[in-house]
Amino acid sequence: MNDLLNDEEEGDSEFLKDQFPNNDEVPLVNYTEPSQPLPENLDWREYGVISPIRGQSMCGSCWAFSTAGMLEGAYKIATGKDTEFSAQMLVDCTYGFKNYGCRGGWPWKAMQWVIRNGIATRQSYGRYLAEEGLCHCGPKDNCTIIYPTSFGDVMKANKTAMKVTLATYGPVSVGINSAPKSFKFYREGVYDDFDCGRF
C-alpha cells in the first residue's frame, strides 16, 4: 500500500495530472465472475506471501515500496521463493516513465518500466538509500533481474473485481490520499473521510 504524502501532492502539479492510467496504457485486469464462491476471508500473510514492512524514511518513495511488495507477493505465489526486490531501483530508474524519485511516483508507471526492463533483487542492486541514486544494473553489474510479463489495473470501485483479483493473482498495489488532516490522527478501523476521495 502506498500513501500520497503532502509534499508529493503539493510539490508538482504535473505529477498529479496523469495519476491514473487509461486503458491504452494499462489494461484492466481481465476477470470473470467466479464459478466457485470466493473465500469470505483471505489473508495472504497466513500464506507467507506478504513481505515484511520496510520504511521509506524521508523519501517520498511509498509508490516504489508498494510496487516492489506487490511483485514480491506475485513472485512468491508463482515460485514459492521469498525474494526482496529493489525499491531503490524503482526510485533511481523510472524517471523516464514520469515518476519523480523521492518526490513521488505511481506504481502503474513503475510497472510499465519493470515490464520493459525487469527488476533487480535488493541484494544485487544494493541497499535502500532513502534518496535518489544513480540507476545501474547493466550487463556488467551482474544483477539478478526478474522479468514479469504483465500487469493490469483493477476496475475502480468494483468490489467483485478487487476480490477476484486478490484471490486469483495475489496482493495488489493500492494508494491512499493521506492529505486530509484526519488521516494524521488515524489509528484503527475503516478510514472514512469525504476529502480522501478527492484524489
Image (tube, grey):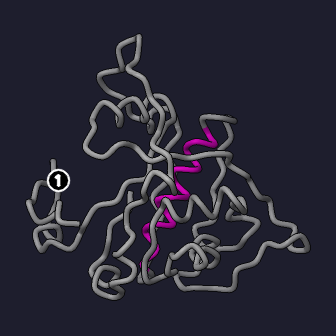
Quarter of the image that includes the C terminus: bottom left
Q: On the picture, is 9 further left or further right than 1?
A: left
Q: Residue at x 52, y 80 (%)?
A: 101
Q: Is residue 174 above or below residue 89?
A: above
User: Which region of the structure is painted magenta?
Assistant: 60-76
123, 177: nearer the viewer? 177
On the image, the x and y values in percent for residue 191 come to 15, 54
Q: Amino acid at mark 1?
A: Glu
Residue at numbered disc 1:
188
Q: Residue at x 45, y 51 (%)?
A: 23
Q: Is residue 89 above or below residue 193?
A: below
Q: On the picture, is 106 further left or further right than 183?
A: right
Q: Residue furthest top?
A: 36
Count up the numbered dots. 1
On the image, the x and y values in percent for residue 35 come to 41, 11
On the image, the x and y values in percent for residue 180 come to 14, 71
On the image, the x and y values in percent for residue 141 come to 86, 73
Overall secondary structure of the magenta stretch? helix
Quarter of the image that includes the N terminus: bottom left
Q: Is residue 11 magenta?
A: no
Image quadrant in which you'd find residue 10:
bottom left
Q: Is residue 75 magenta?
A: yes
Q: Residue furthest right?
A: 140
